[in-house]
């Protein structure tokens, strides 16, 4: 049953009311989301139902449930609103002012990624682009970009995927570190002895874990005692506390070593790179073009063109 929008039939605000109530299942929460009073939102819904001649919701003490007619019309209403949003974006792009929403995955800490500078510059240069950050593991960042759940992401490691384009941002160096309280001489301890000690590793979806396992694989052994931690700062703290050895980003490891809390093993350096990634098919997307322009400004250098990884 197609919805026909006319000036007399309904307002866009009524469709938004319908979609938000369907998403949230409660009139009160939908009213808060739309910044309306509950009576005003109820009035919009009633007007839409009268215009369509269809009851859209069943009301109960627990909330609002879509009727069969409501379920049939919801996707079309969402499509109409999406079409209106696309129309607005196209109009803004014609004016040279890209507009829209971006979901960006972040890994590591905000300071390393320069998230604050990035967001401030993006708001200043492209005020009509709404940016939402999601802290994820590097593996989840890559998976989110592939699936489209994330529009883009910061990522470190090897983005070995032909469908992914990657902007290089900086080199990252990781060092092997162990607690100073172990009393080991870093210059004399062999890898086999160090590998046999307890280790702290990030979850399997993390590039941090991949780097550590690469270190073990190249030397033909595997860790036997593993504690998992999901944050680099936490990992360094656990090393300092004597829980185990691990790899740590060089700047974090050096700072802790200077304070006498950890010891850096000189036998290995792990090199990787920080990237800004998105789907290769979206190279011409004006929103992502804008983000790449902001990145170049924030990182104070002209980055190479996005490369198919």
Image: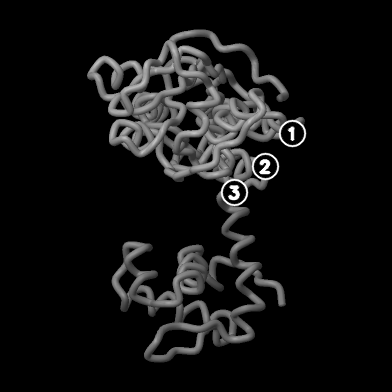
Q: Nearest the camera: 94 or 146?
A: 146
Q: Is 214 on the left-hand or right-hand side of 161?
A: left
- The alpha-carbon separation of the residues under discs 1 and 3 comes to 15 Å
Q: Mark 1 falls on what kind of element?
A: loop
Q: Hey, which quadrant is residue 130 in on the image?
A: top left
Residue found at the very far left of the displayed protein? 259
- Name above or below for residue 36 compared with residue 101: below
Q: Is 190 on the left-hand or right-hand side of 239?
A: right
Please tell me the numbered disc located at residue 149: 3
Q: Nearest the camera: 148 or 24?
A: 148
| Location of residue 250 in the rendering, given as x and y in whole percent from the top left corner | 41, 18
Please tell me the numbered disc located at residue 7: none
- Counting other residues with Cα less than 10 Å from the Cα at mark 2, is it few (<14), some (14-19), or many (20 or more)? some
Quick check: marks 1 and 2 in contact, CB under 8 Å? yes
- The alpha-carbon separation of the residues under discs 1 and 2 comes to 8 Å
Quick check: marks 3 and 2 in contact, CB under 8 Å? no
| Location of residue 282 in the rendering, given as x and y in whole percent from the top left corner | 68, 33
Which of marks 3 and 1 precedes in the sequence?
Answer: 3
Residue underneath mark 2: 146
């Amino acid at each position: 049953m197609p919805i026909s929008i006319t000036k007399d039939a309904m307002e866009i605000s009524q469709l938004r009311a319908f979609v938000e109530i369907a998403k949230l299942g409660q009139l009160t929460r939908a009213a808060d989301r739309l910044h309306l009073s509950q009576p005003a939102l109820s009035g919009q819904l009633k007007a839409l139902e009268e215009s369509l001649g269809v009851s859209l919701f069943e009301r109960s003490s627990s909330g609002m449930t879509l009727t069969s007619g409501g379920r049939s019309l919801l996707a079309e209403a969402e499509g109409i609103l999406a079409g209106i949003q696309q129309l607005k974006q196209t109009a803004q792009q014609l004016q040279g002012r890209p507009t829209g929403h971006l979901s960006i995955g972040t890994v590591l800490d905000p300071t390393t990624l320069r998230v604050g500078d990035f967001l401030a510059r993006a708001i200043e240069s492209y005020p009509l682009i709404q940016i939402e950050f999601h802290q994820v593991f590097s593996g989840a960042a890559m998976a989110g970009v592939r699936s489209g759940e994330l529009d883009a992401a910061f990522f470190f490691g090897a983005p070995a995927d032909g469908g992914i384009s990657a902007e290089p941002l900086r080199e990252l160096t990781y060092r092997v570190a162990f607690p100073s309280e172990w009393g080991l001489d870093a210059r004399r301890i062999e890898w086999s002895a160090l590998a046999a000690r307890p280790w702290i590793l990030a979850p399997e979806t993390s590039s941090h874990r991949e780097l550590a396992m690469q270190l073990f694989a190249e030397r033909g052994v595997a860790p036997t005692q593993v504690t998992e931690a999901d944050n680099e700062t936490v990992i360094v703290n656990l090393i300092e506390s004597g829980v185990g050895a691990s790899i740590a980003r060089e700047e974090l490891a050096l700072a802790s070593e200077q304070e006498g809390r950890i010891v850096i093993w000189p036998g290995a350096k792990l090199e990787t790179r920080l990237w800004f990634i998105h789907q290769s098919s979206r190279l011409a997307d004006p929103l992502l073009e804008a983000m790449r322009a902001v990145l170049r400004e924030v990182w104070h250098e002209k980055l190479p063109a996005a490369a198919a990884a």
